[in-house]
Amino acid sequence: MDAPHYTAKCLTELRSAVAALGGDAHSPRLEGIAEMIIQSMTGPWRSFHTPEHIFDVGAGGAPVEVIAALFHDLVYAQVDSGIHVNLARYVAPYIREGATGLVIEPIQGQEQDPELHMTMGLFGFKLGQVLSPFAGQNEFLSALLAVKVLDGIVHLAARAQIAACIEATVPFRPDAPDGTSCSQTLLNRLKQANTDFALGLDDAACLQSVVMGVKVANRDIGNFASMKAADFLSNTWNLIPETNHELVNADTYTIKGYRVSLQKMEGFLSFLQPAVVFRQFAQEPSDLEHQVRLELTQRNLEVARLYIRLKLVSIALLEALSLRLGQQVSLATIMGKLPGKTIFPIQLENYLPSVTTPYKPASSIEETVMDILETGRSEDSIHDARHSPVASYLVKSLGMQACMHLLEQSRLYFADKLSPEELIASADSTVIQGLEHAVYSVFHHHAQAFVAH
């Protein structure tokens, strides 16, 4: 689907939701709003937080949920390398760029803006606060945008509900030390905003607003509960290039650049627990549905951690070998071909030795990981092949325990506590010889192709 089709779909959803909320569904401004939303969601670095994502997050939701979904990822500063110019004019009067990040500091005359203070109250923010990209910055600015952009189209109470739903999408928050959940905290803040700004919401409406926020938040990260681990990994892989921009060009990114991106993702997933991924509040969702999501999330996290760690071992060895050639060798040069590029018939995987007695998985998690390494994630990625031939070769040859030992050696290498050659020497020599032969074969055919022309 191209941008005009996305924009038309966005406009249709906006008009329908605004009409259901008693707003001005015929406002000519809605066309420009829909165009702004899609332009912002189709920036050059967006590979997961795209128009498809916002439509999925709003799918089947109430009107407030639909609008919240359309706006919730508009500002994503670390992905877009800033705030999209079409959005900046709405938020610029209320923030400035400080030495350590964006600061809530309105320009003269806007200090008492009631819509700003209402949105800050819902997020628990204050004037002068330095915003953190990892603690609500993007969600706050997206919510403020929604409140401002929809002024005159949707009444203030509905805009407060939309902003509350967007606040709910701030991810991965544990309960407070006293056991209060972020959902209960949001309900308390919305009730306070209802009093302070005369929104006219009763307690039931405030509660329902937070329940709607829980639904939006759970759909936002719904891929964590994918029935198939390969689907979860496909979504995870689409996230990686959003904050590792060099990976967008599959022909040129370096082996080290790819390795660093894997380290970031492994570090994030290593400590993530299912309890902070999905929300439950006021019996939304049901106990059974919530438990199923938590169990699927636990399984997917275990698979993803092992999968990424094995890929880290493989990329560490490839990086160490590549340093014999220089510091900036691209992964495509070593592998022979990456997805979406000119077909090069010589690929490293074709020259890896066959393993006569491959390692047999010792658990269902290992079995799933080995299958994904061999057959691939469920969808293509713009920056990486679906399957992982080198990691698969290493596991089948060495077994899981030896690979985990190599992971520890690889971590020492990443920390400059082990030289590249020392890392190579720590691995089984026969396996390394097989890998060296495969790399040599790719370069040999590169050289032949060069001479032939």
Image (cartoon, rainbow, N blue to C red):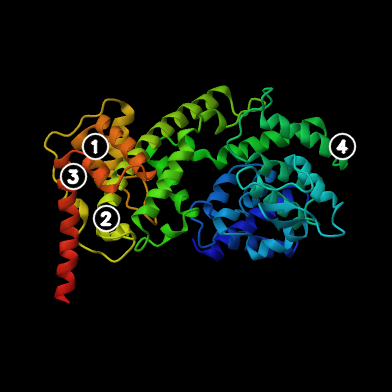
Left or right, 42 with respect to 193, comes to left
Relative height, residue 204 to residue 442 (above, below): above
Q: Secondary structure at mark 3?
A: helix
- Residue type at tag 1: Val
- Residue type at tag 4: Thr
- Label 1 CA crowd tier, 10 Å (few <14, some 14–19, many 20+): many
Q: Secondary structure at mark 2?
A: helix
Q: Which mark is residue 369?
A: none
- Residue type at tag 3: Ile
Left or right, 357 with respect to 241, comes to left
Q: Are marks 3 and 2 in contact (CB under 8 Å)?
A: no
Q: Which mark is residue 322?
A: 2
**Going 57% across and 59% down the picture, which residue do you hit?**
81
Query: Which one is earlier in the sequence, the residue at label 2 or at label 4?
Result: 4
Q: Are marks 2 and 4 in contact (CB under 8 Å)?
A: no
Left or right, 452 with respect to 255, comes to left
Q: Nearer the viewer, mark 2 or mark 4?
A: 2
Left or right, 349 with respect to 43, comes to left
Q: Quadrant of the C terminus?
A: bottom left
Residue 218 in view in this figure: yes
Provide the residue designation for mark 3: 432
- Residue type at tag 2: Ser
Coordinates of residue 266 in the picture (x, y in percent): 43, 40
**Going 14% across and 46% down the picture, which residue do you hit?**
353
Coordinates of residue 201 in the picture (x, y in percent): 82, 37
Query: Which one is earlier in the sequence, the residue at label 3 or at label 2?
Result: 2
Provide the residue designation for mark 1: 395
Label 2 to label 4, Cα distance in Å? 64 Å
Residue 31 in view in this figure: no
Provide the residue designation for mark 4: 195
